[in-house]
Amino acid sequence: MEPTTILNIILSLTVLLFLILVTVRLFKKMKETKLANLKWLIVFFLSQSLIGFTKMAGFDLGFYLIEAIAFLSLELFTKETFYKDQQSAFKPIFVLSVILSIAALTLNTIASVATNAGLPDHYDSYHLMDLYMLSLLGIMSSLWYASASFAAYNQTKEEDIDVNIKKRYKVLGITALFLALQGACLTLFGNIAVPLTAEYNQGFFTIINVSYSLVFAFGNFYSWILLGKKIEKSREIASSEDEISEEEMMKMIKEGTK
């Protein structure tokens, strides 16, 4: 087994562990707080956790389908959390995302059927086209989520609330940028590594891709679990009169964007 393959497996398992822990934490938080918007974030992280298994199984269509579900769910979470009952870029972003998802799934299906049927090689280009569309979907969803997180941070950084709540939104915004970079890396992998078909190049770009995922996964682990524990501890210490809850903070954010 190549060293790059071993490293890729270790990094992938680490990413999976972080994603599972975050998913479990968010599920518990949703049950405790009854915040319905968290269900979309749970679907996102659950989908991200399953992607690796579809890759190992060689189920390309499943990989594309789960990725589409993940990023559409991320957009719904962004809408419900930051822009509920407000004007935003949600509709055009979501409609375009659905179109990209359908196009990517369709092209992937055509390319797979053509390959299995031994049809001309020009159908191989469909595999690159569907990869580009999936990458664009990921980049667009991630950047919108990052923008919303940074906006929440900017609107609350001067407020007298728990510093860990402010830090959470800042970290979420930064890690979302890494998720967007992963989408860009996926495009680069399809454009350079696949055509070269060199095992070293494919392994190298795969490690870069997984490294972006690792930053994103750890950032969310830090935000939702480590910072989450600090936020809960500060709430136990602070009096109810002096404390602004995270739910009240979100109301402040929404009022500030009207």
Image: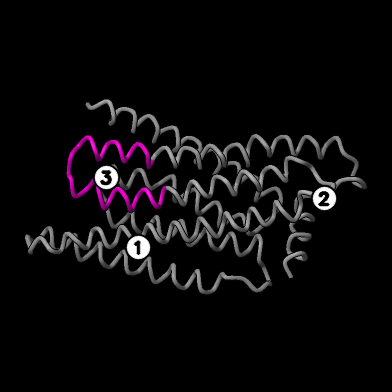
- Asked which quadrant contains residue 193, the reply is top left
Q: Decide if residue 77 is on the left or right side of residue 62.
A: right
Asked if the residue at tag 3 contacts the one at tag 1, i.e. Cβ–Cβ closer than 8 Å, the answer is no
Residue highlighted by disc 2: 159
Report the disc number at residue 57: 3
10 Å crowding of disc 1: few (<14), some (14-19), many (20+): many
Q: Tell me, yes or no, whether the highlighted magenta stretch contains residue 150.
A: no
Residue 58 on image: x %, y %: 24, 47
The disc, 2 or 3, on the residue closer to the chain's N-terminal end is 3
Q: Quadrant of the C terminus?
A: bottom right
Q: Which residues are magenta?
A: 182-209
Residue 115 on image: x %, y %: 13, 58
Placement of 190 over or under 92, stated as above or below: above
Q: Of discs 1 and 3, which sits in the foreground?
A: 1
Q: Decide if residue 157 is on the left or right side of residue 30.
A: right
Residue highlighted by disc 1: 133
The disc, 1 or 2, on the residue closer to the chain's N-terminal end is 1
- Asked which quadrant contains residue 227, the reply is top right
Q: Amino acid at mark 1?
A: Met
